[in-house]
Image (spheres, grey):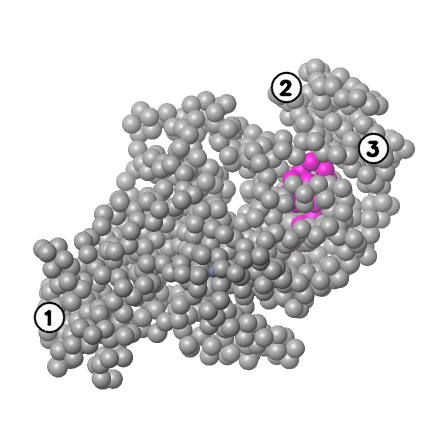
Amino acid sequence: MEEQSLPPQVLLTRAPRGLRMNTETRNSPRTLRLSLRFAQGRNVEVQIAESVRPYVVSVIHHKSAVERSQTSPTGPRLYCLRVPEGKMPEIPNLAEALRRYWGYHEFRPKQENVIRSLLAAHDTCVVMPTGGGKSLCYQLPAVISGKTAVVVSPLIALMQDQAAQLAQIGIPAAAINSFQSSAERRQVMEKAARGAYRLLYLSPERLAAENTFDWLAKVPVGFFAVDEAHCISEWGHEFRPDYRQLSRLRTSFPKLPIAAFTASATRQVRHDILKQLQMRNPHLYIASFHRKNLSYVVHECEPRAQMELLVRALRHYAGESVIVYSPTIRRVEETVEYLEESGIAAIPYHAKMESSMRRQNQERWMSDEVRVLVGTIAFGLGINKPAVRAVIHLSLPKSIEQYYQEAGRAGRDGRPADCVLLWQKRDHVLLEYFIGKISDDAERERSFERKRVISRFADSRGCRHRQICLHFGETPQWERCGNCDNCGAKPEWLRKEIVPVALPEVAARKTSFPPASPASFYTPLLHSEKPRVRDAAPAEADPALAEYLREWRRSMARENKVPAYIILHDSTLEELCRRRPANFAQLKQVPGIGEKKADVYGADILQALRNYGDGARATPMAPKEPAPGEQTLRLLNEGRSFEEIARIRARQISTIVCTVANLVETGQVKLDPKWISPDAQPLIESACLKQGIERLKDIKEAVPPYVSFEDIRLVVAHLRAENRVRAKTA
Ligand SMILES: [Zn+2]
């Protein structure tokens, strides 16, 4: 503990051109040793005696109030400035660190204030929605403080990704978790004690383990950052008893500042966070919960109609990344199967899959190989894909907090995105079943209360944005947002009055990125949908170049054994297409290309751009096995019955009916009256005259109960196809 009470305030600032620094700071009770490695490989070592600490060490060209200086072999001078105890000086170069490491030229709202607050050693509590740039708020101060920030996070996948991402931009970081062997773990712990890391990620379980605090006492910790801090509160929606151990941070390390971060905390939960972590006069930063680029749509559906609506929606978002949340593993699998039958490539993700498969599927989605991912809530923790155009829920979430967090994965690039909740009456039963299994009485009651709140939200006629803000204790100055279903912003694919007209070209859609593979292309069936004009969307990038760079990124990712987005973010890739930098200076102006990235990948990127200019193109994808529709079509043409096809293809009959209906609707096959029960067709047709052919639910209600949904689906498909032919010839 003696060492903990003497942490030297060392700050490395501004490296002149051609100088790499910040390689190692070592701490001993008597002296602080600081080595600076220069580009030419020579070292300069500075020792600062205990009596004159704390110091700011900076390598600069000129500075007043210099106490000591030393000229490095390469010319720049190294200065040490004395600063008063407990006071970090004004940091002039946050923007420089942001540019140098992250390659960004400006901060997002509140980031800079949070960073300054942490650098000034204040306890800090930050509530910032997903996508607001929370992690940078603790990463950047960790980098420039020259000490180790210990980040407590419950999400192992997130820890590993963040450590890998930091390594890519030249910031030493590591995670300690239960997936490592004890030898690996020991190695990380030893290096951490030597101060080798700027960021060190720990799970709450690891923190609670025996000896962890003794070991931490040897690490030159700058501050603690508690991520997902709402987990500490039993009033939060993800209470984790392990998090209660975190109150020991303050008692064991009374001098170190603590920062808490969360994306979704009500007033009550915030209060609990401050109390549990024993924060002292904390600086509070609460960003608005109103994410203007998101459009909320909540729609109750009949069980049979839900899938059709989903297919419609996904056709609308053709070529864009979408997450579909499904309540159970079984429904994840059913949904993927249904979508494939409808000609939409989708991949599943859930907790029961083998972890290698899960990782692979996540990676395929992250790298745009497949655009639609269907997952349980196990998906998405720590996922950072900025260009997600829609998040679609197929059931009521457990709470507003959960909904806000999951839906919030849409539109992190700041461009318009939709959050669609397609719920069913039976969701209540499922939720109540899960809640009923909670053994703790108080927790069960809180869960029921959360369910009551989300049910009210789903049923409400009030502005969705406003309700969410109010839930989190924010009172908007406006009544209506104009960007939710209750404020009149219903997407066209959900409106009743859709009248099919001519087939649009897929290429007519305004997407800045094309689908990554032919498999994710399909012919849209709905026709009145105008291409969506994204007002915030920048100029169109060259799709072939985007595909070429994406292929380059995939090969880099394989080589480096990291996910593709860690090599380059989508937004960076898009910018590269738009700006087409021709040299290093231009490359460094591209947002997301920091110095390390430019060093490591710059030459390759510039070469890839030149190759593209010389005519190189992405390798076309290997032909896939025949689409489900084609297999069914072949079997139909062989004269097989639905039952036989279902058996051969190992599918439900209802799935086969859906495929056939799609074939009928797209005019690839004619409706055969013997597929329909006797007498049903005229009943369905007359119901369609009154109800229209858009909503199967309305037609089902207008025919006698014995008329099956499958028959309705087929007849409606036939009518839609006829309608289209008429519209074309008219
Ligand atoms: Zn609204």
Q: Is residue 634 magenta?
A: no
Near-viewer residue (104 or 380): 104
- Kindly identify the residue that appears in the image at 26 percent across and 72 percent down: 696
Instruction: Check if mark 2's residue and mark 1's residue have beta carbons within 8 Å.
Output: no
Q: How far apart are marks 1 and 3 (CA)?
A: 87 Å
Q: Where is residue 9 in the image (x, y as percent from the top left)?
A: 79, 37
Residue 141 among those drawn in magenta: yes
What is the magenta range? 137-152
Q: Which residue is drawn at 56% across and 43% down?
A: 164
Question: Amino acid under label 1?
Answer: Asp
List the residue tagged with mark 2. Answer: 40
Q: What element carries label 1?
A: loop
* Mark toward the viewer: 2 or 3: 3
Please, is residue 640 above or below residue 134 in the view?
A: below
Per the image, the residue denoted by label 3 is: 83
Please count the marks in the image. 3
Q: Say whether marks 2 and 3 touch (CB < 8 Å).
A: no
Query: Which of the two labelled residues, at mark 2 and mark 1, occupies the earlier sequence position?
Result: 2
Of residues 10 and 288, the one drawn nearer to the viewer in this rendering: 288
Residue name at image x 36 percent, y 71 percent: 301
Q: Quadrant of residue 554?
A: top left
Task: Say which of 512 and 323 sits in front.
Answer: 512
- Please name the residue that numbered disc 1 is placed on: 672
| Mark 2 and mark 3: Cα distance apart in space | 31 Å
Q: On screen, 73 above or below 719?
A: above
